[in-house]
Image (cartoon, helix red, strand yellow):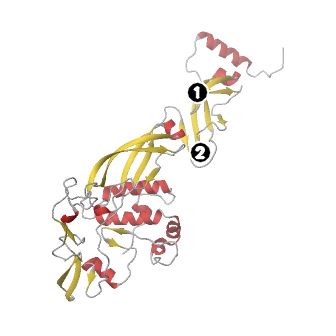
Amino acid sequence: MNKKDYYELLGLKKEATPIEIKKAYRKLAKELHPDRNKAKDAETKFKEVQEAYETLSDDNKRKAYDQYGHAATQGFNNNNSGYASNYSTNGFDFGDLGGIDDIFSQFFGEGFGGFNNQRPNSSATRGADIEATLRVDFTEAVFGKYKTISYQRKITCDNCNGTGAQTPKDIKTCPECKGSGRVVRIQSTFLGTIQTTAVCPTCQGTGKTIATKCRKCKGEGRVVQDENFKIKIPPGIPDGVTLKFRDRGNAGKTGGGYGDLYLTIEVNPHSSLERRGDDIYSHINIDVASAVLGSEIAIESVRDPITLKIPSGTQSGKIFRLAGKGGPKFKGQGNGDHYIQVTVQIPEKLTRQQREVWEKLAEIKDQKPGLFG
């Protein structure tokens, strides 16, 4: 079956930037996640989008894909080529199919026939990541600022230390699997009678059951907590950048580690200034007299007000560059520049006196400077 083009899956052009790739993936992942989208093909599309992002978000994989297509993403595992992928979702691991028992276990359970690989039981899983958006003012993005964000997350219950049991004595060996976390089943299939090993449905693979659940977390092992987290907005941060804060996400089940917090920064526009990278752009209108004779005009900037000298004879569309008057560079030292474009406004209506002046100017417009009589 022919695979779909990765760029097409994400709705992107081949020239898409890493930021555009990440934005497109996050949007589609939210829309197609099986926990949210109940459409029949949602899970399939979710996996396709995730596979596309795994490739295009990695510089080496993306270069190989751009050059060789889907063939570049096949067969690179465990060969130190730089293209190894550990793509995994919903229990199906496509990154490391080590042997025949691993392949069949995807369909028949963790142990197929006599090929049980005796993996250790553990229900401790890493907690889910949290995604959030923070809107900041234009000048806050330019110069940076400390901000406090408020959000909710699940933390490990301090009453039971994540076990879900009221006391350690309430943790019992599972009576169905006898603590192994697995149960053996006999299945009749088109291949004949097959013995499989599956995760114990009673204890979910932990090998333990709880006699009395923790009163605080009701056996969940986690509780919801309001967080006030102080972060630093780096100076010069671009609009749409996502910051990662390790271990600031949700706690995992039964003592699993914490996920991360991904915070996307959205910058509010300014009324008269525009930011392009580290540079600032603005626009001013001047009258004809100021353009012909020259003048000085106060300019709004991200810093202190600037006095811009308009030379005589300035033409409409002229761009002035004020070196070092832009914002701090996001990565590096120094500042960007401030560019100001001038538009000469032609009056639409004239008073009688103004018309007389313009008519006089029209009469003498062809005279050359320095000639008299």
Instruction: List x then y, in percent, for residue 305.
Output: 60, 27
Instruction: Name the residue located 49 percent from the left edge and 32 percent from the top edge.
Output: 271
Instruction: List x then y, in percent, for residue 128.
Output: 33, 58
Residue bearing mark 1: 285
Asked if residue 129 is positioned above or below residue 61 in the image, the reply reads: above
Mark 1 falls on what kind of element? Answer: strand
Upstream in the sequence, badge 2 or badge 1?
Answer: 1
Instruction: List x then y, in percent, for residue 360.
Output: 69, 14
Asked if residue 72 is positioned above or below residue 294 in the image, the reply reads: below
Asked if residue 291 is positioned above or below residue 224 in the image, the reply reads: above
Instruction: Name the residue located 52 percent from the left edge and 32 percent from the top edge.
Output: 272
Q: Quadrant of residue 209?
A: bottom left
Q: Nearer the viewer, mark 2 or mark 1?
A: 2
Q: As rendered, which of 78 and 229 lies closer to the eye? A: 229
Instruction: List x then y, in percent, for residue 132.
Output: 37, 48
Please name the amino acid that badge 2 sits on.
Answer: Lys
